[in-house]
Image (cartoon, rainbow, N blue to C red):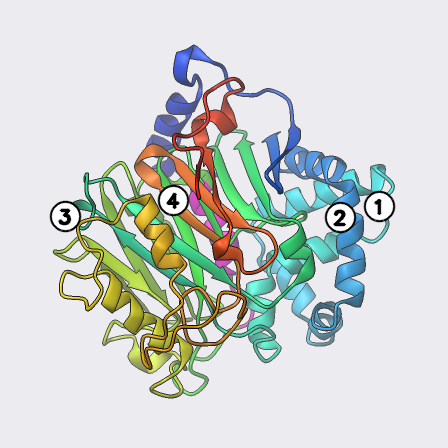
Amino acid sequence: MIWSWFLPGIVAALSLCACGDGGRSAYTEPSREERQGIHVLRLLGTPYQMGWQHGRLMAAELAEGVEFVKNDPLFSLFLPMARSQGLIEDALAQSYPEVLDECRGMAAGAADAGVEGWDLETCVALAYGDVIIAFINDLLGNGCTQFVASGPATPAGVMVHGRNMDWDRLSYLIRHPTVIVRRPEGGVPFASVGFPGNVAPYNGINAAGLSVASNNNGANPDTDPNQRSRRGHTQMIYQMLSRCGSLAQAEEFLLAQTHARATILVVADGERGEAAVFEVSPSHHAARRLDADGLVYATNHFLDPGMDPYDNEPGSPQDSTVCRLERLRQLLPPGGAETRYGQIDAAAAVAVLRDRKNGCTGEVYPPEEFDTNGSIANNGAIWSMVFVPMERLLYLAAGEPPVPSHPYVGFGMDELLHPGAPPPSPSQIP
């Protein structure tokens, strides 16, 4: 279902991507390539067709994923615990139709390629995983840092959206970083950063110049507890990227949904120079927008005063979320102790994501420290990225930790969608 208020954004995005630079047509066949250790997967058509293509093109990696889900010390608990609490049934009932169809297609494509075990249950459970982990004692801890800089915060007025995706040291995700490009039938083309088998993304950018990513947060069990039989937020990111052409449309969609848990979503609109941090709990929400300095940023606790009672972070004055937020305040605003204000372009955004100083104590951690719970770069980053939404660009660092120390490889929506189009300039940020 595509609601009528999203049609203008979809039409505009389709007109932008129908022909790229030099009149090139968008790709018409699914494909995969490897770019500096990153899988690039191109899909198109209906959700079922895109899932089937995914299952066939990534069959070897999905077979490895089956073994990972079975044998990883952490993830081997995921499906059994979800089944025992009836959360698989919730996932099937609360997933959006597009997600279910893509998972059905992926299961069929993987089976056709001879993969045993990558079934509908596994795919849908992962696509509803942000909700499931909230009900099994937050199997994975809080993480992720995001910021958006625009206008006077930048040297040329070009918005940048920085994001470290923090998680545990999950070998499958670290070995298989994947840029998944979708040309959905009747929707907005978009690219997400994920892993083989990932349908509901944690981060992505679309052809309309909208970038979206999530930060984990926990609902306060006393004031606004997690709720069963509601939607998950990573699936909402899929919907926003495939339907929305503006921050206003993304916000309208988000506020019309039911919410199972607390989260923080950052949305940047390059075309309009707008951005917001959406603080969402099961029954409450608030938006923090770009301030007069052209900045907005987030870690893992709510900052809007009206939302403060509804999350369970921070637990202490030196929690990771507090110290990373303090470090952002030192690096981004004009009055910060080590500010980069006025010079925050993509390269400066990378420098912020690589920052290893604890904002509370001043301690600088060595780069090889994977998760110190104290700095932006050393908080369990498995992917690190900078979006340039107006230019439809993504710069991605991935691979073996320390991830932010890797070069940030460039991907442009134009070249991802249009064979033969030139790569981003620069092609990477070293």
Q: Which residue is mark 4?
A: 387
Residue highlighted by disc 1: 115
Question: How far separated are the C-alphas under marks 3 and 1?
Answer: 52 Å
Q: Which mark is residue 152?
A: 3
Query: Looking at numbered disc 4 in the image, what kind of residue is underneath it?
Result: Phe
What's the CA distance linking mark 4 and mark 2? 28 Å
Compare marks 4 and 1 and give the one earlier in the sequence: 1
Q: Residues within 10 Å of mark 1 (few under 14, many from 20)?
A: many
The local secondary structure at tag 2 comes to helix
Real-space Cα separation, disc 4 to disc 1, in angstroms:
34 Å
Crowding at dot 4, Cα within 10 Å, few <14 / some 14-19 / many 20+, comes out as: many
* Residue 62 numbered tag: 2
Secondary element at image label 4: strand
Residues at circles 3 and 1 in contact by the CB criterion of under 8 Å: no
- C-beta proximity under 8 Å, tags 4 and 1: no
* Structural crowding at the residue carrying mark 2, measured as other residues with C-alpha within 10 Å and reported as few (<14), some (14–19) or many (≥20): many
